[in-house]
Amino acid sequence: MNYLNMSKSELTQQLEQLQAEYKKYQDMGLKLDMSRGKPGAEQLNLSEGLLKTIVSNDDCKTADGLDCRNYGVLTGIPEIKEMFAELLGVEENEIMVGGNSSLNMMFDAVSAMMTANVNGGTPWAKLDKVKWLCPAPGYDRHFGITEYFGIEMITVPMTPQGPDMDMVEELVSNDSSIKGIWCVPKYSNPQGITYSDETVTRFAKLKPAADDFRIIWDNAYAIHDIAQQGDTLLNIMEECKKYGNEDLPIIFASTSKITFPGAGVACMAASDKNMKFFLKKYTIQTIGYDKLNMLRHVKFFGNYQGLLDHMQKHRAVLEPRFKAVTDKLDAELSGLGIAQWVNPKGGYFVSVDVLEGCAKRVVQLCKDAGVVLTGAGATYPYGKDPKDSNIRLAPTLPPVEELEIAMNLFCLSTKIAALEKLTK
Amino acid sequence: MNYLNMSKSELTQQLEQLQAEYKKYQDMGLKLDMSRGKPGAEQLNLSEGLLKTIVSNDDCKTADGLDCRNYGVLTGIPEIKEMFAELLGVEENEIMVGGNSSLNMMFDAVSAMMTANVNGGTPWAKLDKVKWLCPAPGYDRHFGITEYFGIEMITVPMTPQGPDMDMVEELVSNDSSIKGIWCVPKYSNPQGITYSDETVTRFAKLKPAADDFRIIWDNAYAIHDIAQQGDTLLNIMEECKKYGNEDLPIIFASTSKITFPGAGVACMAASDKNMKFFLKKYTIQTIGYDKLNMLRHVKFFGNYQGLLDHMQKHRAVLEPRFKAVTDKLDAELSGLGIAQWVNPKGGYFVSVDVLEGCAKRVVQLCKDAGVVLTGAGATYPYGKDPKDSNIRLAPTLPPVEELEIAMNLFCLSTKIAALEKLTK
């Protein structure tokens, strides 16, 4: 029953039928939120032990005797640097541990490069034009940072292997005003795509026209599998070192979706040269970040294996939620010719491409019946999806029962929007 | 026995005697640190209760039901905003709560004004020349921020009533390239001076040539009395509002020296217009700061009175330390004509002006005998004290017994340096 092969009268009949069904949802007074990648209460409860690790004056020291309550240690306590180094496959001296937000560290990194140049050249804020590559669909908050700083964003299409590397190579090697690219290389936001080995290697081999070009490698979902057998991502730092390109990537991660989104620990990894540049700023910016919270995390996990074990508990909570979403998509939308999606093996989102020109309408229909989705267009630079097609679903927060209701409404809305367009 | 009235042979004899004494200190193998305003272990232990306030999944909610473990609430939880508003004498909607460091918030504020203009004009990063007023002696980390951003620093002398306001008014009203001033208005770092009512009022009445001129009002020691009867500071925001100048001040504070320096909570206060400007950035920069730590603080103090009561415990710890320092200064250096200081009623430092041209030598002599002081010059822009005279003593970290030894050495070194100069 592909909508694209149906006659106008069949479509109209179908639309009327679904509108009646939609009315019922409107009457249910729903109030559900699938808009943000926000862990649910069950996930937060997994980290209760974190709250109990430091409860007396005697719990506050690192292995080497540093009192985490006091000032000192700019780049983070050794124990947590070791853990993050293992997580990201870099050296400990390539790690800087920050506050509770990797987004904040990325903002700070771009901000630092706006007012000082990583290679000693002209700070970007003094240039007439700075451009940035934005694989899309992508993470709205990344695009928000470059937009905030007045950086011109160029959309690069995503493929199932990652960003379109032909286009990336072409642009980066010819235009010295292109200074960076946003990447979520594993379980990309929103599509859940993991960059292929070839993609990572091509990134590592880039020969940018701008010597201050940097890859922002936001490894937000490094160990966030949903499937039993998750994806693997090639180590960007190792690859870059092979080609003498270790200054290209600046890597980020956090425990926001491992322990607490509001009270986790974030980190950055970069080459010696890049780190020297950023530490020049951090030395001035702060005396140091919250070391008690770093120590809490280390005590809670014990070691890196403890961290991985903890992620299995998240997987147990999330797997049924993602299944609820993709099962509904399969049952309701497959074969209709009006929607495409990929079942992700990890991450926090399911990305659905609805019929061109229908995304805004779908989001509106859902909203009018009480289900909030991420705004249509949010996954593109400037909030403008040229095809008005991509919608990001965030299945983590609502319980499965609610998700199923929300997904019924989403599929219904997707059909209605398509039928409205096809019968116009 | 004023050194300045002694004959050369008397001075030489005195010097030889003191050098012998200094040798003994060198042989003691001391290893003491009076360099930074770092609370001692006794002070840190006062906040053990903070560690025990959130130890289960049930402790994590604000009064209005917000789960502090999760994402959400950019400007801070209502309870802590209320507490900071009371601390700073501003409205709750004028408060933004940040991470663990007010220094970081100040850095961010200046950084924000570098890349965007608070009044919609040209961002400072695009101007050829930006200047800043630096009351000195002052806080080295303030000067570090303006130096980092390439802002030209102009020294304004401190008087017992605060910065020389004749000079401030003259400069600010005539030079539109002057965009700001650093202020520690209560128990100033390092002198412990509290700005007089007249000084605060003159700040509030400023008519800057630059419409984007801002006063960075770092109220770091707002409730940090050492004397039983502390100083009082006029409310800058209230004063500014009287003259329609509420956009002038940007106010900062933190609990770094109330609870834990490494894991406290910082805040900023500003007018609606300024806050709108900064929130535009914060919205992009982060999803929100560590709300669990905010909630911990609220639960620990109970209310603002609890915060004030807690400060009395700090006072009990600090008062003997400051007394040890000023008693030694009185006993060893008064009447010699080679050193001046003020006994501060609060704050974290004692500032000593030694004989002109001798500060570096005094710090070196102390260091060579195992006592680290703040580097001479650090209290001036660019680390250059034009008179090479000011030394900042930080009495909080070492126990009283150690302080007394360190102060003996300091006084001895001050005498030796003076005698070396006078016998040259």
Image (tube, coloured by chain):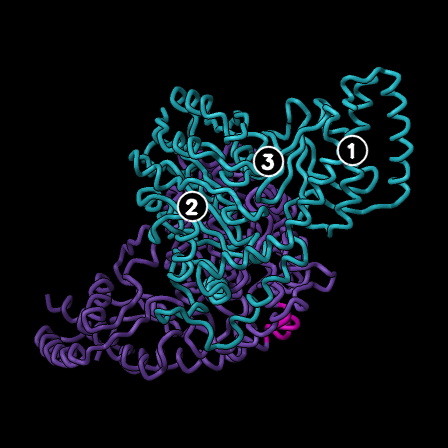
Chain colours: A cyan, B purple
Q: Is residue B299 magenta?
A: yes
Q: Secondary structure at mark 2?
A: strand
Residue at point 35% right, 82% down?
B327
Indicate left or right for B339 with A311 as reference.
left
Check if mark 3 and mark 2 are on a common chain: no
Q: Amino acid at mark 1?
A: Gln
In this orientation, which residue lies closer to the viewer: B298 or A293? Answer: A293
Using the image, name the chain to which the residue with label 1 belongs.
A
Residue A258: x percent and y percent? 55, 55
Please give the label number shown on residue A191.
3
What is the CA distance from the residue labelled 1 to the residue labelled 2?
50 Å
Stretch of the chain drawn in magenta: B298-308
| Label 2 neighbour load within 10 Å: few <14, some 14-19, many 20+ | many
What is the CA distance from the residue labelled 3 to the residue labelled 2?
48 Å
| Label 3 neighbour load within 10 Å: few <14, some 14-19, many 20+ | many
Q: Is residue B153 visible?
A: no
Q: Is residue A326 visible?
A: yes
Indicate left or right for B414 with B245 as reference.
left
The mark that comes first in sequence, 3 or 1, is 3
Residue designated by label 2: B132
In this orientation, which residue lies closer to the viewer: B90 or A77? Answer: A77
What is the CA distance from the residue labelled 3 to the residue labelled 1?
21 Å
Q: Secondary structure at mark 3?
A: loop
